[in-house]
Amino acid sequence: MPLLDIQNLSVEFTTRAGTFRAVDGIDLAVDEGEVVGIVGESGSGKSVTSLAVMGLIPSPGRVVADRLSFAGRDLRALSASQRRKITGKDVAMVFQEPMTSLNPCFTVGFQIMETLKVHEGLSGKALKRRTIELLEQVGIPAPESRLSAFPHQLSGGMNQRVMIAIAIACNPRLLIADEPTTALDVTIQKQIIDLLVQLQKDRGMALILITHDMGVVAETAHRVIVMYAGQKVEERRARDLFERPQHPYTGALLDALPERALGKRRLPTIPGVVPGIGDRPRGCLFNPRCRFARQDCLDLRPPLFPDPEGQARCYYPLGGDMWGAPE
Amino acid sequence: MLRFILTRASLVIPTFLGVTFLSFLLIRLVPGDPIEVRVGERGIPPERLAQLRHEMGLDQPMWKQFADYIGNVLSGDLGTSIVTQNPVLDEFFTLFPATVELGLAAMVFAVLAGLPAGIIAAVKRGSWFDHGVMGLSLTGYSMPIFWWGLLLILFFSVQLGLTPVSGRLDLLYYVEPVTGFMLVDTWLSGEKGAFASALRHLVLPAIVLGTIPLAVIARMTRSAMLEVLGEDYIRTGRAKGLSEGRVIGLHALRNALIPVVTVIGLQVGTLLGGAILTETIFSWPGVGKWLVESINRRDYPALQGGVLLIATTVMTVNLLVDLLYGVLNPRIRHAR
């Protein structure tokens, strides 16, 4: 049984313009100790999916799912206070913007200790010792003196380390990192990803790494889910995905990697943007941007087709009839 | 920190001069000087009038009078009241505790009611509570103090007989003034019923005086909370599994308080201005009522001294608020 088991998850926001499905029928299973990468452009529903797992969808948003279970417990059946016992303890999250994700009015020590107090009931010397230990584990130098520092006194990278310390404080079984390096300098990005991977290995926790950086996924993830306009368009093991992508969107994302464009004068790009609330096309959601779109793609919305290595939401996968033409 | 206080203090000098000059000028623009007002319709022989004016220095040119006054103020002498012949400073400080007590009570009322109302309105944005609080606070803010005061007196004092109409204490009681704060003095006196009587006298004027600050605080708290509740660190708090009470009451409120405290500080000026009307309506023996009487009697030294001292109070409170701002907001504290 997977640690996190989600079937047919949708998140809807009702606005005056109508109901908008930010996430549309996602299946997602994460095993204990597994690293799953979720990739896709901005607006593809990656973050909303993770917020739904955390129970953090703001109030007008509606979360529906056929199954939403963590460690065998149905998250939908839990009361708000029961859910809080899991959130931040067994499932923790690191966000995109470290500078604004920490409360500017409290010291980093306070903000780490708060989690330990609420979930583990630690206090006094034990609490302080554990907090310093956590700061050491996330690679913050001189941890004792950092306890009384405010977030504005630390750099973005240091703040993200503090966020990670908060997230791993109660030894979560699943850590969700939502574009944890997007807001950071390139040199720091590598450090933070390395830290996350190392912590994941040391603790054997499951890690969902949300990113739009294919390079990061290639290095870290065991399995990759590609999302587009709220839907899962492809899923397979990382190595297979990079060697034999099936969905044209995945293929285009990989072609846009600089290291794959050697010898080309210009880096290939995907024209256009992810469709928003008002401009969802008929047929396949990717068809306006797809180089290979045919008549079927304009008329019919493709389901996810299973193949021997995973699944792809495309009538005409890049592999063609590699496994025999889909009917 | 010391440098900050000194810089702030030096900015006070032009304000002082301006306030002194304005009160000096304006009271002299009102027809009738202290002597004319005192003799009223009885009349006074012209030579006697001239003699009295000379004794008071009122026959001097205006600029000379002003320069003399400034000189005296700088040497710590605010003059004596023309009416009572007591030093202005003594009169002010005898009456000041009554005003402070009223102002504090009004502020406590405004904060205790305004903060929670603003917080709940923000959390339940768009609900009937939110609309109700915002509507009421707009009404409260727009209501003339004297009308609101008379309305409350009519209802609670006259109709229901719940509260006394005026004063600070029933005539039945006499308490030795120790602190000047009636609540404290009646408490210390141990006399039965005195404290309750003082409290009953305080309730209505405090509500009247606190209404405008209450409205301002409620609206400000709501908008500050709304802004803060959309911040990333609020989401982080929820992601840590903290209770809603802790997320809102600690993480959000702590940040929302920063602008609210500034507004509370600015309300102190409004409060002392409102005290003049409130004290007059309720015959509250404080500096507000005393100032109105000084105007009526053209008691120049009392009025000028009173205005100057009130301005000092407002500036001091604003300085304290600025210092408190640094305590509340770590980003400012460390920038200094």
Image (spheres, coloured by chain):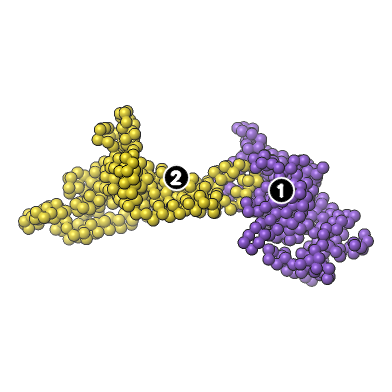
Residue at 68%, 63% (x, y): give it.
A277
Disc 1 secondary structure class: helix
Residue A111 occupies which quadrant of the picture?
Answer: top right
Residue at the disc numbered 2: B113
Q: Chain of mark 1?
A: A
Please identify which colour was used for chain A in the image.
Answer: purple
Residue B16 in sight: yes
Please identify which colour was used for chain B in the image.
Answer: yellow
In the rendered structure, the answer to whether residue B69 lies left or right of residue A129 reads: left
Residue at 67%, 59% (x, y): give it.
A19
Residue A217 occupies which quadrant of the picture?
Answer: bottom right
Q: Residue furthest front?
A: B159
- Crowding at dot 1, Cα within 10 Å, few <14 / some 14-19 / many 20+, comes out as many
Disc 2 secondary structure class: helix
Tag 2 and tag 1 share a subunit: no
Tag 2: residue type? Ala
- Residues A17 and B41: in front is A17
Residue at 47%, 51% (x, y): give it.
B133
- Crowding at dot 2, Cα within 10 Å, few <14 / some 14-19 / many 20+, comes out as some
Residue B282 occupies which quadrant of the picture?
Answer: top left
Find residue A14 and report its horizontal and vertical position in percent.
Answer: 65, 58
Question: Number of labelled discs?
Answer: 2
- Residues A155 and A235: in front is A235
Find residue B322 and report its horizontal and vertical position in percent.
Answer: 44, 49
Residue at the disc numbered 1: A53
- Residues A185 and A20: in front is A20
Tag 1: residue type? Val
Find residue B222 and report its horizontal and vertical position in percent.
Answer: 50, 51
Find residue B307 and report its horizontal and vertical position in percent.
Answer: 28, 51
Residue A181 in sight: no
Q: Residue furthest right?
A: A324
